[in-house]
Image: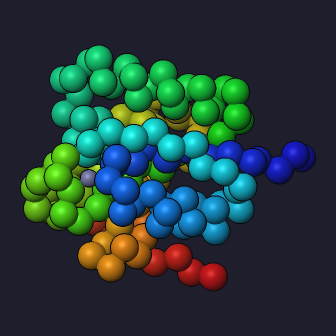
Amino acid sequence: MSHTLFCTAINCMDGRTQLPAIQYLQRRFNVAYVDMITEAGPSRILAEGDDRERIEAIRKRTNISVTAHGSTVIAVVGHVDCAGNPVSDEEQWAHLKKAVTRLRQWYPELTVLALWVDDQWRVREITWPQDKPVLETLRQ
Ligand SMILES: [Zn+2]
């Protein structure tokens, strides 16, 4: 089986989140490259779903990453102090949950996950085991 070189991140355009997301995903999935799709507060765009133009732009770019680069992992990334989505962390986590749900509908065969970049620019993975957010750090 050939090694997957690429994964995909749907990240905020905030410059503080780029390297942490890339480095986390490289470690977590052993990929060389992270295709970066950026918007201002993408989790809210994907959660609300009413900005069809932007949704389609995200989807189009994600499709390129999946079909041309063979990405099998899509991460949607949120972070503290987001100017594009200036709501509480808890509200952002709820947006991330909905964004993950939408992406899993688009790509049921792929791995979709939510990442959170905290106030020290560490990356945590969010899961919702009992419908409540749990933030985990990468175990090695
Ligand atoms: Zn942001």
Residue 136 in the image: state x and y as whole percent.
Answer: 42, 75
Q: Is residue 15 above or below residue 48?
A: below
Taking the spot 64% from the left edge, 62% from the top edge, the residue there is: 26
Residue 34 in the image: state x and y as whole percent.
Answer: 60, 49
Q: Is residue 36 above or below residue 50?
A: below
Which residue is farthest right? Answer: 1
Say whether residue 1 is left or right of residue 59.
right
Model colouring: rainbow
Question: Of 108 and 66, which appears nearest the observer?
Answer: 66
Question: Of 84 and 91, which appears nearest the observer?
Answer: 84
Residue 126 in the image: state x and y as whole percent.
Answer: 37, 64
Taking the spot 52% from the left edge, 31% from the top edge, the residue there is: 62
Residue 76 in the image: state x and y as whole percent.
Answer: 41, 48
Taking the spot 57% from the left edge, 43% from the top edge, the residue there is: 35
Say whether residue 28 is left or right of residue 90.
right
User: Which of the image's four quarters has the C terminus?
Assistant: bottom right
The picture quadrant where one finds residue 25 is bottom right
Taking the spot 39% from the left edge, 41% from the top edge, the residue there is: 38
- Say if residue 100 shows up in the picture: no
Question: Of 125 and 133, which appears nearest the observer?
Answer: 125
Say whether residue 60 is left or right of residue 85.
right
Which residue is farthest left? Answer: 87
The picture quadrant where one finds residue 81 is bottom left
Q: Is residue 84 above or below residue 21?
A: above
- Say if residue 59 shows up in the picture: yes
